[in-house]
Amino acid sequence: MRKVFIIAAFVPFFCKAQIINNSPDTRLDSFYTPVSNSEMRIIYFSAKAKNDGYALTSLAKIENENQFLPNVLASDILQSAYMIGKTNQDPALLYLIATYENTANLMDLKAGDILYEAYALATVKKNAFLLFKIATYENIENLMDAKAGDILFEAYRSALLNKDVSTLYKIDRKSTRLNSSHTVI
């Protein structure tokens, strides 16, 4: 019994704590960035074989900046990632694609349409944190017909339903900053 207590006491020193993060970008944190044509080709074909839309989105960004692959366009890579996101109904992936498409303009689709698809899927899946991110992004960029306030309210409702205290706190902080920036005459 005594050995168990001693082992339990030292576990935090030997084990890394799991970092909990609601960000859809967390899958990209450990992504290896290719630096040559051969590395890009290997990582690209691996991501295609695995249907990894997050890796393909990152590769589209890299290809757009460096043109490592002479036979593959960044727009084709991003389109593949979009199709994976649509097929898998992954609103976080669609959000990443929409935010990148808004700056790069690689695809035939408008960033606002992709963002609206992400919003619709996040609403169905009750993903409060992603709805909050979409509302924040929409408030700045104004890409969709949906109002940022309506999206934020949907995020609030989803966070209440899911008992997502972290997102509720972020929504409260955001609304407090918005309310304090208005002056009453």
Image (spheres, grey):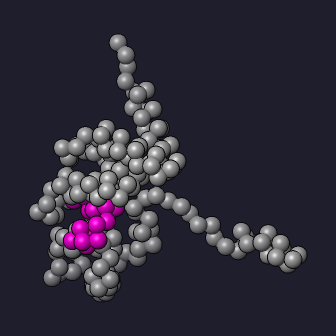
Please state which of residues 99 and 32 is positioned toward the viewer in this rendering: 99
Give me the residue at 35% from left, 78% from top: 34
Residue 24 position, x and y percent, is 39, 61
Task: Please state the extent of the stretch shown in magenta in the rendering.
Answer: 83-103
| Residue lying furthest left | 108
Judge from the rendering whether residue 158 lies leftward or rightward of residue 148; answer left or right.
right
Q: Could you tell me how many numbered marks the image carries?
A: 0
Q: Which residue is drawn at 44% across and 41% down?
A: 171
At 19% across and 52% down in the image, what residue appears? 112
**Residue 26 vertical position relative to residue 158 in the rendered view, above or below:** below
In the rendered image, residue 1, in percent from the top left (x then y), is placed at 87, 77
Q: Which residue is drawn at 56% across and 63% down?
A: 19
Residue 37, horizontal then vertical, whole percent: 27, 83
Quarter of the image for residue 79 reads: bottom left
Is residue 94 located in the magenta-colored stretch of the structure? yes
Using the image, determine if residue 112 lies above or below residue 181: below
